[in-house]
Image (cartoon, rainbow, N blue to C red):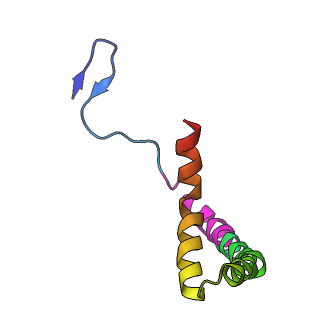
Amino acid sequence: GTVDEHGRQLGGSVSCGDPEALGSKALVLPYLLIVLYAFLGLAVVCDEYFEPALQMISMRLGLSDDVAGATFMAAGSSAPELFTSLSE
C-alpha cells in the first residue's frame, strides 16, 4: 500500500480492533435487559401519570379522547425540539 510522509498507511480499510476481543457478544444480553427495563419504566410512567393527566385535561377542555390524545401526544413529542430551538 501507499505510505504518507509520516509513515501512515493510506487507503485500505480502517479497523478499530477485533470485536471479538472486546467481548461484544457478552454485552448483548445486559444491553437488551437495560433496554427492556427502560421501556417497562416508560410504560409505567405513561400509565400512572400521563394518561390520567391527559384525561383530566381533555375533560376540562371538552375534547374527545381521540383529539386530546393526538394533540397532546404531538405536543409532548415535539416539545424537546421546540425548547431547543427557542434556546438558540
Q: Is residue 29 magenta?
A: yes
Q: Is residue 70 above or below residue 21?
A: below
Of residues 29 and 70, the one drawn nearer to the viewer in this rendering = 70
The span shown in magenta is: 19-35
Measuring 69% from the left and 69% from the top, which residue is drawn there? Answer: 38
Residue that lies at the very extreme toward the top in this rendered image: 5
Quadrant housing residue 5: top left
Of residues 1 and 12, the one drawn nearer to the viewer in this rendering = 12
Q: Is residue 76 above or below residue 58?
A: above
Quadrant housing residue 3: top left
Q: Quadrant of the C terminus?
A: top right
Q: Is residue 48 above or below residue 16?
A: below
Majority secondary structure in the magenta region: helix
Give percent across and percent down for residue 12.
Answer: 25, 37
Measuring 74% from the left and 81% from the top, which residue is drawn there? Answer: 56
Give percent across and percent down for residue 19.
Answer: 49, 53
Quadrant housing residue 8: top left
Measuring 47% from the left and 44% from the top, which residue is drawn there? Answer: 17
Give percent across and percent down for residue 75.
Answer: 56, 65
